[in-house]
Amino acid sequence: MTDSSPSRLDLLHFARRVLVQQATASLQQIDGWIAEEERREAERRRGDEARPAPPEWLVQYGLNRRTVDAVHCGDCWVAAKSDRCRPVTRAQALEALRQQVPACTHCRPDTALEFREEA
């Protein structure tokens, strides 16, 4: 009677093939994750590069969208929370201050613009 069970060496070779197959599959999965993350990072960088520069000055309109409520610096956190702000030029911001539009008390555009009220 012959023993048809695989030898210990055959079993070790089989175990090695299984391990190589599983490791290859795992590496392919990780390589896919890396490629996807690299794509996301490149997309994020392209978005950052394509984003226009923030405005230097903003005016905040009232609820009726006609009256101007305040003048802000472009990076003001208060203005960032409002959907009623629109970008303006330096000259427009100065003119709004001359027209007695209040300066934001948080970002102080009047100080940044070196605006002094004429008495």
Image: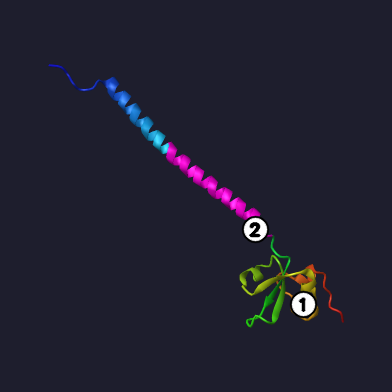
Q: Secondary structure at mark 2?
A: loop
Q: Is residue 44 above or below residue 107?
A: above
Is residue 97 visible in the rendered image? The answer is yes
Residue on which the image places disc 1: 96
| Residue 19, image x, y percentages | 36, 31
| Residue 76, image x, y percentages | 68, 67
Q: Secondary structure at mark 1?
A: helix
| Residue 56, image x, y percentages | 73, 65
**C-beta proximity under 8 Å, tags 1 and 2:** no
Q: Is residue 89 above or below residue 2?
A: below
Query: Callout 1, which amino acid?
Result: Ala
Query: Callout 2, which amino acid?
Result: Arg
Principal SS element in the magenta part? helix
Residue on which the image places disc 2: 51
Which tag, 1 or 2, sits closer to the chain's start?
Answer: 2
In this rendering, which labeled residue sits more in front, label 1 or label 2? Answer: 2
**Chain part drawn in magenta:** 27-52
